[in-house]
Image: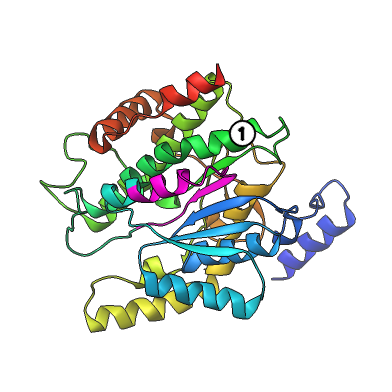
């Protein structure tokens, strides 16, 4: 212990060994005015999506709470109204586990002929203990987290392009698609021979695959947007490890639910609350310093926590462009949605 104290004293008195002072950390208060901006957040009724919606609405944005459950969506809007009365919000019912629901939602949105300035693909399913399927027969994590958001982004591209047409080249004015990934992607693998886990199902393995797929698609979208000279940005973020409803909800036994609730409280104390976990999402969505194709997360221990946001570490398999192109093609085939030719035509 005396040796450690002496080393600290030596570092303090030697200017070359002192830590370099950090610049001001980016906070939610740094979000610029979002007046007249329309923002759609999937899964905005709880967790990170809720806190992102609340903070963006406080900056003047019109928030569309895209939620699967009417009752929970209405409760979320009431909660926001009680916290900050008079904010601009609306509820839209969207089930990302149903392509029919996605088509219906997108058609209603586009029928308004209004620009969409920010799409945050936040909703997700995490590690159900038994294999479940979407309405279209896909494994629920791949079908919701990946295919659902792929189809939604594709179908809403005209509204994003409308916003892009009215924007300047300034990053603050450009519309964005923000994809919420996870540090779990680092252990993910894309199993093209069994994407829907029909042969073998691992709850965490399927989740890791879906989060890796989210990043691959986000980066491929960025490449295609830039190739088309589009002003739309594709950015990704992850929350670290946060105490969200993803961790606690699901079809578990009473004992396991109690254990997950307890562990969730520990995560909230030792790592991130869902409010803190929303900071990388907000940064990716609004910061002038967020870049095309960027991936952002907390800068604390192993990127699991922290009040400072920065570039997140990307696993090698998430940079595989050949895999990304193949996955993109598979997503188009499975969803029946092909959208990028339309963007390229408008940009040209």
Residue at the image point whose x is 69% and y is 46% from the top: 287
Asked if residue 240 lies left or right of residue 20, the reply is: left
| SS label for mark 1 | helix
The colour scheme applied to this rendered structure is rainbow
Asked if residue 236 lies left or right of residue 141, the reply is: right
Residue at the image point whose x is 85% and y is 59% from the top: 12
Picture coordinates of residue 49, whole percent (x, y): 51, 62
Disc 1: CA contacts within 10 A as few (<14), some (14-19) or many (>=20): many
Asked if residue 86 lies left or right of residue 148, the reply is: right
Residue at the image point whose x is 40% and y is 43% from the top: 214
Quadrant of image for the N terminus: bottom right
Q: Which residues are magenta?
A: 104-124
Quadrant of image for the C terminus: top right
Picture coordinates of residue 92, whole percent (x, y): 44, 60
Judging depth in this view, the residue of 112 and 188 nearest the camera is 112
Judging depth in this view, the residue of 221 and 229 nearest the camera is 229
One can see residue 293 in this view = no
Task: Tell whether position 205 is magenta.
Answer: no
Picture coordinates of residue 300, whole percent (x, y): 60, 57
Q: Is residue 21 above or below residue 168?
A: below
Residue lying furthest left in this view?
Answer: 199
Q: Quadrant of residue 338?
A: top left
* Total numbered labels: 1
Q: Is residue 69 above or below residue 215?
A: below
Task: Tell whether position 111 is magenta.
Answer: yes
One can see residue 312 in this view = yes
Picture coordinates of residue 166, whole percent (x, y): 67, 34
Q: Which residue is mark 1?
A: 164
Asked if residue 65 lies left or right of residue 142, the reply is: right
């Amino acid at each position: 212990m005396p040796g450690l104290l002496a080393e600290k004293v030596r570092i303090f008195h030697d200017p070359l060994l002192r830590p370099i002072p950090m610049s001001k950390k980016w906070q939610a208060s740094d979000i610029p005015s979002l007046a007249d901006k329309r923002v759609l957040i999937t899964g905005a009724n709880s967790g990170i999506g809720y806190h992102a919606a609340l903070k963006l609405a406080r900056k003047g944005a019109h928030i569309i709470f895209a939620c699967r459950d009417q009752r929970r969506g209405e409760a979320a809007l009431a909660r926001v109204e009680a916290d900050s009365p008079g904010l601009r919000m609306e509820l839209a019912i969207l089930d990302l586990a149903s392509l029919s629901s996605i088509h219906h939602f997108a058609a209603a949105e586009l029928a308004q002929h209004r620009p969409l300035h920010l799409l945050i693909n936040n909703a997700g399913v995490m590690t159900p203990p038994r294999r479940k399927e979407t309405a279209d027969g896909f494994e629920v994590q791949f079908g919701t987290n990946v295919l659902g958001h792929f189809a939604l982004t594709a179908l809403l591209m005209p509204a994003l392009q409308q916003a892009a047409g009215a924007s300047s080249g300034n990053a603050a004015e450009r519309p964005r698609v923000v994809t919420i990934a996870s540090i779990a992607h680092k252990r993910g693998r894309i199993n093209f021979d069994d994407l829907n886990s029909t042969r073998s199902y691992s709850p965490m393995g399927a989740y890791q695959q879906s989060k890796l797929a989210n990043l691959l698609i986000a980066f491929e979208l960025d490449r295609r947007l830039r190739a088309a000279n589009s002003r739309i940005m594709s950015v990704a973020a992850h929350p670290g490890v946060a105490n969200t409803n993803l961790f606690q909800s699901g079809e578990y036994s009473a004992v396991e639910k109690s254990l997950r609730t307890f562990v969730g409280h520990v995560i909230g104390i030792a790592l991130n609350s869902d409010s803190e976990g929303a900071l990388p999402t907000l940064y990716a969505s609004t910061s002038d310093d967020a870049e095309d194709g960027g991936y952002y997360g907390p800068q604390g221990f192993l990127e699991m926590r922290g009040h400072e946001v920065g570039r997140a570490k990307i696993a090698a398999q998430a940079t595989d462009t050949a895999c990304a192109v193949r996955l993109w093609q598979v997503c188009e085939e499975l969803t029946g949605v092909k959208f990028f030719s339309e963007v390229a035509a408008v940009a040209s």
